[in-house]
């Protein structure tokens, strides 16, 4: 069942999303050569709690951190550890917050120091595909219009698209219906309606589609060891079109 949120609920989700966007803005500045992921995670947890929120990932199905911290060939669900970041790494940070009972979810990939032109191109294309997916999230369109927009843009560059994971409804819980694939598969294709709140999240690999899970039972990595990137926004569908609720400071009007 896809939950339709009323305007009061959307305002609550918007507040949660603003706090998350502010936290991610600051977290990104901490992702530099020599930084320790575990310390960034601690800083993020502190910022969330200072803002009156709760890290929604911490303890979720037993996840041990506030931040998913996925380096290089890690796609999603990486656990922040003690190994210092090196120039040439790419880091996908993914975070969720519960604030006054309302949930937000957003992710971004950041380059540490110098990365190759091929990795830069992957980052650019995947981030563009997030915004193409958001643009497709118009009331009256269908769910798979989002999937198609994301898929087509990345597939045109022969990048791999992660299939077992994708976007989702969000807002009154961290993960709600519907599941939003980053490819056009089978299954229901509901019409998008005002009041839906969804997380759109392309996960894009420089190599093939396939992934595997590490022995920590969390970290999803590419099967071929190629690097992977991840971009995510929480988006409300309104009568006027999509509103990016996790909009970053620099894009706010
Ligand atoms: Mg996320
Ligand atoms: Mg998500």
Image (cartoon, grey):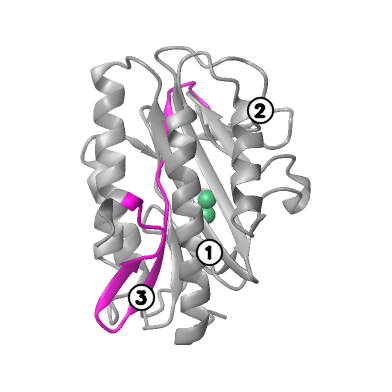
Determine if the magenta segment contains residue 225.
yes
Q: Which residues are magenta?
A: 222-249
From the top left corner, tell me how far across and down residue 126 is, in percent.
31, 41
Q: Are there few (<14), some (14-19), or many (20+) residues within 10 Å of tag 1?
A: many
The picture places residue 150, in percent across and down from the top left corner, at 30, 52
Ligand 2 within 8 Å of the CB at mark 3: no
For the residues bearing labels 1 and 3, Cβ distance under 8 angstroms: no
Q: Report the residue at 63% width, 51% height from top.
A: 50
The one of 247 and 89 positioned closer to us in this rendering: 247
Name the residue located 59 percent from the left edge and 56 percent from the top edge: 51
* Vertical side of 160 occupied by 152: above or below: below
Lateral position of residue 46 relative to residue 244, left or right: right
Point out which mark residue 16 bears: 1
- Which circle marks residue 157 in the picture? none
The Cα–Cα distance between marks 1 and 3, rounded to whole angstroms, is: 17 Å
Q: Within the image, what quadrant is residue 123 found in?
A: top left
Ranked by sequence position, the earlier of labels 1 and 3 is: 1
Q: Is mark 1 within 8 Å of ligand 1?
A: no
Q: CA distance from mark 2 to mark 3?
A: 35 Å
Q: SS at mark 1?
A: helix
| Nearer-N-terminus badge (2/3) | 2
- Image x and y of residue 155, in percent: 27, 42
Label 3 sits on residue:
237
The answer to whether residue 228 is magenta is yes
Whether disc 2's CB lies below 8 Å from ligand 1 is answered no
Mark 1 vs mark 3: in front: 1
Secondary structure under the numbered disc 3 in the rendered image: strand
Q: Secondary structure at mark 2?
A: helix
* Residue drawn at point x = 65 percent, y = 71 percent: 101
- Name the residue that disc number 2 marks: 38
- Side of 243 relative to 17 (left or right): left
């Amino acid at each position: 069942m896809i939950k339709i949120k009323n305007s009061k609920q959307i305002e609550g989700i918007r507040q949660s999303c603003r706090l998350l966007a502010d936290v991610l803005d600051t977290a990104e500045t901490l992702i530099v050569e020599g930084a320790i992921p575990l310390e960034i995670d601690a800083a993020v947890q502190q910022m969330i709690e200072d803002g009156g929120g709760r890290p929604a990932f911490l303890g979720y199905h037993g996840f041990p951190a506030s931040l998913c911290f996925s380096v290089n060939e890690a796609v999603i669900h990486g656990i922040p550890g003690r190994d210092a970041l090196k120039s040439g790494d790419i880091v996908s940070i993914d975070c969720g917050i519960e604030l006054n009972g309302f949930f937000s979810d957003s992710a971004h990939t950041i380059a540490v120091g110098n990365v190759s032109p091929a990795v830069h191109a992957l980052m650019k294309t995947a981030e563009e595909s997030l915004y193409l997916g958001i643009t497709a999230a118009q009331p009256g369109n269908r769910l798979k219009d989002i999937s198609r927009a994301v898929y087509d843009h990345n597939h045109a560059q022969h990048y791999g698209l992660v299939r077992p994971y994708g976007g989702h409804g969000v807002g009154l819980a961290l993960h709600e219906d519907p599941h939003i694939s980053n490819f056009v598969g089978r299954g229901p294709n509901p019409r998008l309606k005002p009041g839906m709140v969804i997380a759109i999240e392309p996960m894009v690999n420089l190599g093939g589609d396939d992934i595997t899970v590490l022995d920590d039972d969390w970290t999803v990595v590419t099967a071929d060891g190629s690097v992977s990137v991840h971009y995510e926004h929480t988006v409300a569908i309104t009568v006027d079109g999509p509103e990016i609720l996790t909009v970053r400071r620099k894009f706010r009007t």
